Image: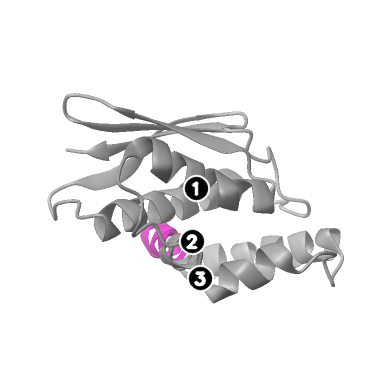
Amino acid sequence: MNETTHRFMAAGPVAADPKGLALLSAMTAAEIWASASPAQARGFYMAVGGRLAAAQPMDEATDLALLATRANMLWAALDWGHVDLHMEDQGIAIRHEGLPHALDGDVDGHWREIVSSVLEGVYDAWFRALGSGATLMTRTVDFNGGTLDLWHGH
């Protein structure tokens, strides 16, 4: 766990009102989608996911079970559910359950795109840090309610 993650997880009470932060996040998303193309907005949130992945480095994760355990420490701290990872013949199936269903103040309905892009960025960054090949990628397969299915592979 790096210093940023350690400070966040040990900080105790949140200094700002979560509803106010959610509203600010929703307004930021609305501005991003109004100013950028959909591909640019997705790229932005995938980059945010990369930063989030860097806050919980996985360099010591030697197998999928340890990777999931370490990832779930972060998701528990954020109240973003949990992940199950399964090795398949052609890649890794990622099932992230218990995600928030909405973002307060998101009248434009960007939450699904935000959370799927952020998590694509997080998981892709973690797999790349662990040696994933350049031809492999992480992508959303399905998002149903609070469950996001992703795939890392070809």
Q: Amino acid at mark 1?
A: Ala
Q: Residue at x 62, y 32 (%)?
A: 146
Classify residue 97 as left or right of residue 89: right
Q: Residue at x 35, y 38 (%)?
A: 64
As helix, strand or loop, the secondary structure at mark 2 comes to: loop
The mark tally for this picture is: 3
Question: Quadrant of residue 38 in the image?
Answer: bottom left
Q: Are the residues tagged 3 and 2 within 8 Å (C-beta)? A: yes
Marks 1 and 3, Cα distance to the nearest angstrom?
Answer: 13 Å
Membership of 116 in magenta stretch: no
Q: Are the residues tagged 1 and 3 within 8 Å (C-beta)? A: no
Q: Position of residue 41 (x, y in %)?
A: 45, 62
- Please state the extent of the stretch shown in magenta in the rendering: 37-46
Residue at which label 3 appears: 2
As helix, strand or loop, the secondary structure at mark 1 comes to: helix
> In the displayed structure, would residue 139 be above or below residue 132?
above
Residue at which label 2 appears: 56
Q: Position of residue 101 (x, y in %)?
A: 68, 37
Q: Position of residue 11 (x, y in %)?
A: 76, 69
Residue at which label 1 appears: 71
